Image (cartoon, rainbow, N blue to C red):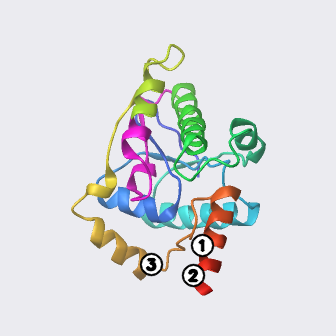
Amino acid sequence: MDRRSNNCHLLHVCCAPDLVISYLAGARGDIFFYNPNIHPREEYEKRLNEVLKLANLWDLNVLPTKYEPELFFEEVAGMENDPEGGKRCEACFRLRLEKSAQIAHQYNYASFSTTLTASPKKNVILINSIGISISKSTSDANVTYLPNVYRKSSSYNDAQKLIKQLGIYRQNYCGCVYSMSNSLNLRKSLVL
């Protein structure tokens, strides 16, 4: 589905569970699933299909995008060994929000935001400060970032129930190969 609207909101979506949380908290707009960090490609497609399932259920517009993992690897080169939540994650957030701002600017959206702030494992202050900084930049000055904290919504617990009820796939790592490796190592240590 690709029905772009002038002067409406563009919602960057990282995954279906965070979309459910954000949607129940009141987030609306055309969906932009841009996540070059997700590894491997099968995981990317699985997450995209779950977002498309929700978009179909709620009649949401989804803008097409490409899977561009090479851009993620270029962006985080030299940060491979950084801890989860460190500079590598900051670079990843920036990459995704910059692309969202570019698309919002290109298609005349008045504002953009992200479902990244629905995750209890993400640094909301950092994400929102990156979004605000990007929206103040010269090239995208006519597109406003709308800061939010979707995980603080009173409907958070309802969202968790709905995710389970709809059978939405819940990933067990952030998305990148580095977080996947951390998750596998953690699970191995718990088994031992």
Q: Earlier in the sequence, mark 3 or mark 1?
A: 3
The residue that mark 2 highlights is 190
User: Element type at marker 2?
Assistant: helix
Classify residue 64 as left or right of residue 140. right
Residue 143 visible in the current orientation: no
Q: Mark 2 and mark 1: span between their CA atoms? A: 6 Å
Q: Nearer the viewer, residue 5 or 92?
A: 92
The residue that mark 3 highlights is 166
Q: Mark 2 and mark 3: span between their CA atoms? A: 29 Å
Classify residue 102 as left or right of residue 132. right
Queried whether the magenta region covers residue 115, the answer comes back as: yes
User: Element type at marker 1?
Assistant: helix
Q: In the image, is residue 41 above or below residue 33?
A: below
- Residue density around tag 3, few if under 14, some if 14–19, many if 20 or more, within 10 Å: few
Quadrant position of residue 87 = top right
The residue that mark 1 highlights is 186
* Amino acid beneath label 3: Leu
